[in-house]
Amino acid sequence: MLIAYLNTLKNKNIFLCSQSKPRRNLLEQLGLQLNIYPSSFEEDLDKSLYKDPKDYVKDTCQGKVNDVLKKFQQENINWDIAIFCDTIIVLNDKIIEKPENEQQAADFLRTFKNNTQYVHTACFVLFNDKQNNKVIERHVIDTCKVIFGDIPEECIIAYSKTDHFKGKCGGYGIQDVGASFIEKIEGQHSTVIGLPVYSLCKILVDNIKELNWQ
Amino acid sequence: MLIAYLNTLKNKNIFLCSQSKPRRNLLEQLGLQLNIYPSSFEEDLDKSLYKDPKDYVKDTCQGKVNDVLKKFQQENINWDIAIFCDTIIVLNDKIIEKPENEQQAADFLRTFKNNTQYVHTACFVLFNDKQNNKVIERHVIDTCKVIFGDIPEECIIAYSKTDHFKGKCGGYGIQDVGASFIEKIEGQHSTVIGLPVYSLCKILVDNIKELNWQ
């Protein structure tokens, strides 16, 4: 989708405000050249205050946006596009994020197997409209349904003893060995990786046209 | 899934009988060490003889199996597991394979946009049961539903002028810029890449146990 606009985007300062390697890979595969500028937002909102987990993931992502925008101003950073994401899993009405240790990674997989989970990824895209001296904010909360198959206990134990679970929401990556646990998905597989590529490209193309960027 | 059996598999000669780089990547991400041994089967079966496209993709894959098994014998190759795949797309009851040129790649995308296609991947796995002097054949034909979004004409033109379409069924890869065209899938995303990882792992684990390989 972006391929017709890569020349335009080459002249823009694009910031990915995340330290996730898989997110970076997704964007680089699209042909984007990125600056990496993770937010230092704490990600500690009180889950009990949220009835709808999509509001929780949206507010966490909005927290990252606010944090980085402030720093962009303070540090006088020259930016054109900034991309922010946050990903959570919802299983049996409970929000699941990164496992803290081997034990929790194994427990997660035991609750995932033969079960259906929902991965929600919030993606905010900010455009710096320098001509009109304003910031345009667009966002999407995309959901992918993920259906796990059966996972033998010996595989859960062996998996949790590796590094594969570390730093990943739910402790698995659909883009690596995690694919072997997943019987079926319904949605964008990139949403499970942490950045809904189709939704993001739509936002980028629509707004590049609207801003009349050449 | 395979993670508990990687030590067993390290002592086995595993052959991927395909020259597809994305298929190889999927298997290597699982931790498998592979020998690459593509078949030279012509892939020219008469489509008009098939009512169900799944039979067509199955027979093409079976053709690859027969070709390679004969060569394994002729060349006296020491093998334990051999993996074969074939992928087709079905759109409006028509079988679609690799685009032949830029023009066809663009035409494919024009028929794909705002439309639903079915990707069928046949995967045959052969186990060499040396103890009982027999070959065990297992297979699966997995289907993934792929729903394309709208694609602006300027993006179709720009895309077809790149190398991205070359050598790919339908002329796109869900694992690269092709992801930006796809609004939603239902199934295994690895089936769209050309090798259903979940299904394959299930076959491997079940048969390693049955063969009592250590």
Image (tube, coloured by chain):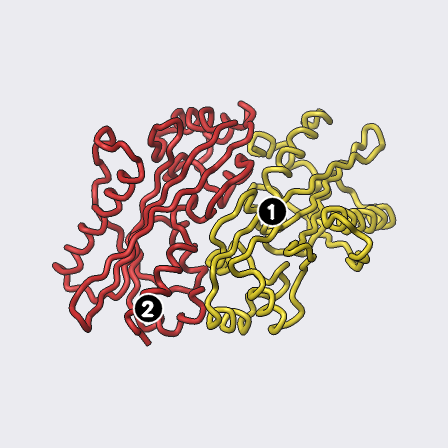
Chain colours: A red, B yellow
Q: What residue is rendered at 63% in x and 70% in y?
A: B104
Q: Is residue A73 above or below residue A141?
A: below
Where does label 2 land, which residue? A208
Q: Quadrant of the C terminus of chain B?
A: top right
Amino acid marked by disc 1: Thr
A144 relative to B51 in the view: left or right: left
* Subunit that carries the residue with mark 1: B
Q: Nearer the viewer, mark 1 or mark 2?
A: 2
* Percent coordinates x, y for residue B43 in the rendering: 77, 58
Residue lying farthest to the right in this orientation:
B74
Amino acid marked by disc 2: Ile
Q: What residue is rendered at 69% in x and 53% in y?
A: B18
- Quarter holding residue B31: top right
**SS state under label 1:** helix
Q: Is residue A208 above or below residue B42?
A: below
Q: What residue is rendered at 27% in x and 32% in y?
A: A51
What is the number of callouts on the image?
Answer: 2
* Percent coordinates x, y for residue A55 in the rendering: 27, 40
B212 relative to B112 in the view: left or right: right
Where does label 1 land, which residue? B191
* Percent coordinates x, y for residue A97 in the rendering: 34, 35
* Percent coordinates x, y for residue A111 in the rendering: 44, 25
